[in-house]
Image: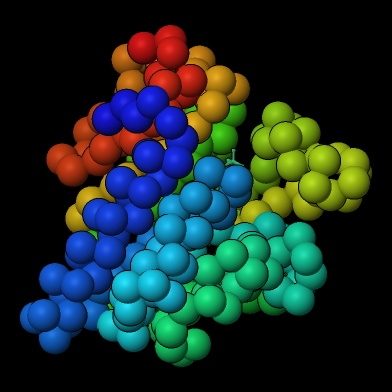
Amino acid sequence: YIYKEATDASVAVAKEIATLIKEKQAENKQCILGLATGSTPLGVYKELVRMHKEEGLSFQNVVSFNLDEYFPMDPSSSHSYHHFMHKNLFDHIDILPENIHIPAGNIPLDQVHDFCMKYEEKIKNAGGIDIQLLGIGRTGHIGFNEPGARSNSRTRIIVLDTLTRRDAANSFNGIRNVPQRAITMGVSTIMNAKKVILVALGENKASIIKKAVEGNVTPLLPASFLQNHPEAKFILDSSAASEL
Ligand code: GLP
């Protein structure tokens, strides 16, 4: 789906999410959202906050699972995805704090495996993810599933690609300060979501989008796995779609 302007793409995604939240409300059910960070989903979150404030959209039936978090990373750090999610979404809506799940970047390394297994279990016990929102990294990563990630991978700790760390360097005041690792949902965790919406905006995503959509399905470009998902959409602005 190609929108001329990034704002229109973001509004369309927010509408789809809001519609599902309301449908679930009408059925007295929880709506399980998989959420993403990065600059790309900011417009979606802004629109969801607007809908909450101006249209009374309630998030009380929403249970959220974030894709990833740097490791090590204190949740209180301004670099953490915890901080990002609260600042850009959770602090402005009525989601119940106990329904928010974000991988913990501040646990000892020897507890990470257990933590990841429990994260998977929580997603399963919630009934699985209804809509998974995704951005895409210039390596083709989804979440932090970097090139080489297997199709059967689940939530785990990974080593970040140099390009990913370079892209994050600005916000960390230099690549030296960007963590080497992260905890991320796996490719299989993402593929198990009932619907997947990948958003890509801007010219610097054009070449990776072309490869992800038109190239071979390969672990060397994890976003390409979405070609095999029955309900995955790519929502693009005209710049991100310019090489298709
Ligand atoms: C990070 C996140 C990804 C995100 C990517 C792209 O690496 N872990 O989930 O998709 O950045 O970020 P941006 O949207 O800022 O281009």
Q: Quadrant of residue 110?
A: bottom right
Q: Residue furthest top?
A: 243
In the picture, measured across the screen, residue 103 lies left or right of residue 241, that is right
Ligand 1, image quadrant it occupies: top right
Q: Residue at x 23, y 80 (%)?
A: 30
Tell me residue 85's x, y (percent). 58, 67
Q: Is residue 84 visible?
A: yes
Tell me residue 137's x, y (percent). 56, 35
Q: Nearer the viewer, residue 204 or 99?
A: 204
On screen, 99 above or below 68? below
Tell me residue 108's x, y (percent). 73, 75
On screen, 112 above or below 46? below
Q: Nearer the viewer, residue 138 or 28?
A: 28
Q: Residue furthest front?
A: 54
Which coloring applies here?
Answer: rainbow
In the picture, measured across the screen, residue 85 lies left or right of residue 96, that is right
Image quadrant where one finds the C terminus: top left
Q: Residue at x 44, y 66 (%)?
A: 50
Q: Quadrant of residue 107?
A: bottom right
Q: Residue at x 79, y 69 (%)?
A: 77
Count of picture labels: 0
Image quadrant where one finds the N terminus: top left
Q: Nearer the viewer, residue 67 or 235?
A: 235
Q: Is residue 222 visible?
A: no
Q: Residue at x 32, y 34 (%)?
A: 234
Tell me residue 40's x, y (percent). 53, 43
Q: Nearer the viewer, residue 180 or 10?
A: 10
Q: Quadrant of residue 68?
A: bottom right
